[in-house]
Image (cartoon, rainbow, N blue to C red):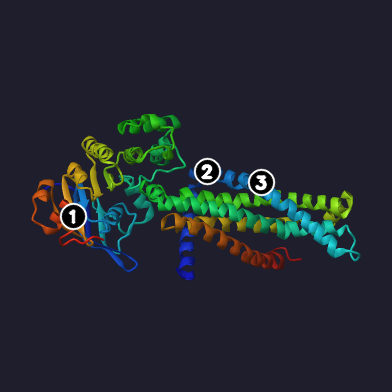
Amino acid sequence: MGAVAELGELTILVGRMIRTLPKLHKTLRLTLVQMNEMGVGSLPLVVVTSFFTGGVAAVQAAYQFQGWIPDKFVGSVVGRSVLIELGPVLTGLVVGGRVGASIAAELGTMKVTEQIDALEALAIDSIRYLVLPRFIAGAVMIPVVTIFANALAIFGGLLAAVGSIGMSTGTYIEGLRFFFEMSDVWSGMIKSLVFGAIIALMGCYYGLQTSGGAEGVGRSATRAVVSSCLLILISDYILAEFLFSWLFAE
Amino acid sequence: MSEREIALSVRGVEKSFGRQRVLRGVDLDIYKGESLVIIGPSGCGKSVLLRHLIGLHEPDAGSVHVNGVDIAHMNRSSLYEVRKKFGMLFQNSALFDSMTVGENVAIGLKEHFNLSRAELHKTALVQLDLVGLADAVHKRPSELSGGMRKRVALARTIAMDPEIILYDEPTTGLDPITADVINNLIRSLQKRFHATSITVTHDMVSAYKIADRIAMLHKGQIIYEGSVHEVQTTDNPYVKQFIHGTAEGPVTAA
């Protein structure tokens, strides 16, 4: 299918989903199930990823500062780069892989086994029943997971700074606070909200487009992951422009 | 016969998928309370036709009237209202594997009516009892055999007291004995609820058992309609070849 046609189909899906929003209360329980799956289920993966990301950021910063910039700025660099960039983007990519593939595979299997038709035949709107809960859960839980990821990455940076660079905890925290801006936290949250929406939407879109049995399900899962990763990186650039030269411009 | 009230009326329905023309102007009337069986070789578009009747496909041309209302180009919310009158049994049962058997049976009621958990459970048990599977209420669909899954799907199909029931190849993939159990169930439900039922099948044993009337679909058009007796004694070469299952004749395998 051509890119234009795909964009059209995606727009129709989003349009149909928005029209089901007034019936969100009917899908609340399903949404909570999805939130648990996406949020709590993703934590172990995010803990490991962000902890080491923070550590690496600290070690790299210290290496590049050698003899030129005081150690206390290690904390500043780790803090800001994690809050603005590393936390949201890495969480988006890692959770996007996990959640996007699982949504696409689940909906894809439902599609090829006629379960989605069965829902429709029972007069249940498959978009409200399946897509809306996943979309809401993604847009809410990816930012929540990102908050955990940020905290853990900064903590990982602290451990690396103290353990392998030989800084004191006080110096690291002083640097962290020195350049801290609340707008960094907000911009990271806005980004992760967009990433969460992208991940859920790509999973649902490719899941519902599935045809051709087990092979088709595998193809949909791959497409969901690849497209959400690409869209996260592309939208990250667009958001950076929007957030820092417009919304939080000084 | 012509005095009877028409439940569904299909006029000039055409449908293509890509370059493949599946339905080429289907005309068919289905009377209230009758059991119509649509037969035809694999790939002739039987299931596609069935899916048009409940609005799962939108025709490229033509109309599908349900109780006098055209559903072919209806908006989504009205279509959902019409669908509440339908029940559909899918070829591979299409049970929701994230739910228990009981939840599968009760999902329509749960979504459309304000019922308590206890009431839903009770209704699910009543429906499952009709198909002889009340003790499977807490099981998962994956724990059941193909025949049992089909019976659960049947219980789900009738749970909302449908006026019109669609069966997509109800006996395909089942052993002859289980197939007969399903045929008997369909027949007894028919008698009990007086629902209009439309079955798509290529299983002639099943067709003779559940049909009041049989229609044959070939190359995207209805080429024959008649009672079971008329079908069995017809001179129509297409029907004759199909019901006797011979490779030689005007119908070529898909």
Where is residue A216? Give x, y as percent. 45, 58
Give the left or right position of residue B135, taking residue B46 as reference: right
Looking at the rendered image, the quarter that the N terminus of chain A falls into is bottom left
In the displayed orientation, state which residue is furthest to the front: B247
Quarter of the image holding residue B26? Answer: bottom left
Chain letter for mark 2, please. Answer: A
Q: What percent of the width, then of the height, locates residue A27?
A: 49, 44
Q: Which mark is residue A44?
A: 3
Label 1: chain? Answer: B
The residue at which mark 1 appears reads as B216
User: Which residue is depicted at the point 54% across and 45% down?
Assistant: A31
Percent x, y for residue B16?
31, 65
For the residue labelled by badge 2, is the local secondary structure a helix, a strand or a loop? Answer: helix
Q: Secondary structure at mark 1?
A: strand
The kind of residue on which mark 2 rests is Leu
**Quadrant into which the C terminus of chain A falls:** bottom right
Q: Earlier in the sequence, mark 3 or mark 2?
A: 2
Amino acid type at circle 1 is Met
Observer-side mark, 3 or 2, equals 3
**Residues beneath discs 3 and 1 located on the same chain:** no
- Residue with the mark numbered 2: A28
- Residue at left 65%, top 46%? A43
Is residue B19 or residue B165 the one in the foreground? B19
Q: Quadrant of residue A69?
A: bottom right
Vertical order, B164 against B122 (above or below)? below
- Distance in Å between CA atoms under marks 3 and 1: 58 Å
Residue type at mark 3 is: Pro
The residue tagged with tag 3: helix, strand or loop?
A: helix
